Image (tube, rainbow, N blue to C red):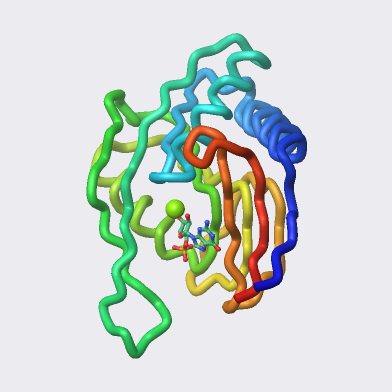
Amino acid sequence: ARVKTILDQKGIERTLTRMAHEIVEKNQGGESLVLIGIHTGGVPLGHRLKERIKQIEGIDVPVGCLDITLYRDDWSKLSYLPIVKRTNIPFTTDDKCVILVDDVLFTGRTVRAALDAISDLGRPQKIQLAVLVDRGLRELPIQPDFVGIRLDSSPNEHVNVLLKEIAGQDQVVVVQK
Ligand code: 5GP
Ligand code: MG
């Protein structure tokens, strides 16, 4: 397998700092923001964005999470079916600006399921999408509002997102299978 590092620890930190600035800029400071991370990678990223928004604007943005698992409903197909397993969103999303956070955006199917789940929970004023890596290869018309790094990946590549909260180190690598 060929391995290429696309973000090191400093790179991830700078990228998240930039994204936090973009989020508060696009939302006039962010008084009505709430963050929802998609388990697993999106959750620590949501908390890191919260910390940075606190540093920039001095406000406490609530962070919730959605657990979405991918099942292949038919092994003859490449695509899979995302199922919402658990939600932990202990605050109202009514009239809020929800920032959905994930580590990698690929086909868009997970985000589509997340949008359904969020719509079942309340009536946000708007929903925006922040991802650390957009690897392209979308199968649905879903685009991120905030992107760490954009790749033109191929289907036989995989992006390994290592985060210190989960993996003990910060690094993003592309692995060619
Ligand atoms: P999608 O539903 O857009 O096809 O895939 C997005 C979900 O699958 C995300 O929650 C993401 O964590 C995971 N995913 C898809 N491709 C990759 C990848 O190359 N690397 C990692 N780490 N996760 C991926
Ligand atoms: Mg994931």
> Which one is nearer the viewer's eye here, 171 or 111?
171
Task: Locate residue 171: give its quadrant.
Answer: top right
Q: Where is residue 174 shown, x and y percent of the image?
A: 67, 62
> Which one is nearer the viewer's eye here, 133 or 129?
133
Q: Quadrant of the C terminus?
A: bottom right
Q: Where is residue 152 shown, x and y percent of the image?
A: 71, 69
Q: Residue at x 58, y 77 (%)?
A: 155
Task: Locate residue 4: give its quadrant.
Answer: bottom right
Q: Where is residue 92 shown, x and y percent of the image?
A: 30, 26
Q: Where is residue 131 shown, x and y percent of the image?
A: 58, 48
> Which one is nearer the viewer's eye here, 120 or 75?
75
Q: Is residue 124 left or right of residue 175?
A: left
- The residue most toward the bottom is 76
Q: Quadrant of the N terminus?
A: bottom right
Q: Is residue 5 left or right of residue 70?
A: right
Q: Residue at x 33, y 64 (%)?
A: 70
Q: Is residue 123 left or right of residue 23?
A: left
Q: Is residue 140 above or below residue 25?
A: below
- The residue most toward the top is 58
Q: Is residue 107 above or below residue 162?
A: below
Q: Is residue 90 above or below residue 11?
A: above
> Which one is nearer the viewer's eye here, 14 or 107?
14
Q: Residue at x 70, y 32 (%)?
A: 13
Q: Is residue 24 left or right of residue 123?
A: right
Q: Residue at x 67, y 34 (%)?
A: 16
Q: How many marks can you see?
A: 0
